C-alpha cells in the first residue's frame, strides 16, 4: 500500500491538477507544485506549496480569489472547493446574530468598493464577530498592505486545503 506522499507523487497529472485547483484556483500555483514531484515527504509538499503561493503574481492571487464567496455567504455547488468553503465558514455562521450578519455584509460591500475584490480571511475557527473586526480593521489599509495580507490569507487557505487532500490520500 502506498503512503499518501507516494500516492501524491504518482497521481496522474490531470487528477493532481484538479485536486490542486480545488485548493487554490490559480493554475500557476498548482503547476509549480506538480513540477516539483516527486517529494520526499509531506513537509516538502507543504513547503513547496507555501513557496509557490508566496511567488504568485497579483493576477494569480485575483484568480484564486475568484473562487471564494463573500465571507458569510454560503458557497454554492457541490464541488470539493464549495464544500470546503462552507466548512471553513461554518463557525462564523453558527455564532452570528442578525446585527453582526448585517454589519458583515456592509463591511464586505465597503471592502469590495475600496479594494475591488472580495474580503478574504482564513476563517476556520473564527467567529463572525472576529471576522467582522478584521474586515473593519483592514478597511484602513492601503492597497499595497492589503494585497500582502490577502495573498497571505489565500496561502493559508490553500495550505489547509492541501493538507486535507493529503489526509484523504
Image: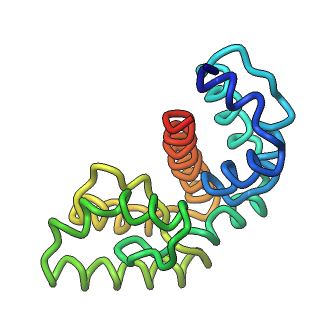
Residue 27 placed where, x, y %?
A: 79, 55
In this rendered view, identify the residue nearer to me: 74 or 144: 74
Q: Quadrant of the N terminus?
A: top right
Across and down, in percent, residue 137 comes to 36, 62
In the rendered view, would you say 66 is above or below 47? below
The residue drawn where x is 61% and y is 69% is: 67
**Colouring:** rainbow
Q: Say left or right for 25 vs 132.
A: right
Q: Which residue shows up at 13% across the image and 77% down it?
A: 97
Q: Spot the residue most to the right.
A: 35
Q: Is residue 130 left or right of residue 139?
A: left
**What residue do we see at 49% from left, 63% from top?**
120
Where residue 135 appears, as percent x and y from the top left, is: 38, 66
Out of 169 and 107, give the one closest to the viewer: 169
**Closer to the camera, 168 or 143?**
168
Which residue occupies 52% across, 46% down? 161
Can you give x and y, in whole percent of width and height, for residue 118 in the image?
A: 53, 73
Quadrant for the C terminus, please.
top right
Q: Is residue 112 left or right of residue 103?
A: right
Residue 134 falls in image quadrant: bottom left
Question: Which residue is outermost to the front?
Answer: 1
Q: Please, which residue is most extreme toward the top here?
A: 40
Total residue callouts? 0
Residue 121, picture quadrant: bottom left
Amino acid at each position: 500500500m502506498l503512503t499518501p506522499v507516494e500516492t501524491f507523487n504518482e497521481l496522474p497529472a490531470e487528477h493532481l491538477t484538479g485536486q490542486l485547483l480545488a485548493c487554490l484556483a490559480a493554475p500557476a500555483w498548482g503547476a509549480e507544485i506538480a513540477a516539483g514531484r516527486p517529494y520526499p515527504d509531506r513537509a516538502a509538499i507543504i513547503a513547496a506549496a507555501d513557496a509557490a503561493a508566496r511567488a504568485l503574481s497579483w493576477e494569480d492571487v485575483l484568480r484564486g480569489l475568484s473562487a471564494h464567496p463573500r465571507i458569510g455567504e454560503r458557497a454554492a455547488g457541490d464541488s470539493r472547493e464549495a464544500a470546503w468553503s462552507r466548512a471553513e465558514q461554518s463557525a462564523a455562521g453558527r455564532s452570528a446574530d442578525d446585527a453582526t450578519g448585517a454589519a458583515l455584509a456592509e463591511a464586505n460591500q465597503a471592502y469590495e468598493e475600496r479594494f475591488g475584490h472580495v474580503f478574504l480571511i482564513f476563517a476556520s475557527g473564527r467567529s463572525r464577530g472576529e471576522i467582522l473586526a478584521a474586515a473593519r480593521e483592514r478597511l484602513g489599509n492601503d492597497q499595497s498592505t492589503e494585497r500582502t495580507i490577502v495573498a497571505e490569507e489565500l496561502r493559508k487557505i490553500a495550505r489547509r486545503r492541501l493538507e486535507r487532500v493529503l489526509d484523504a490520500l
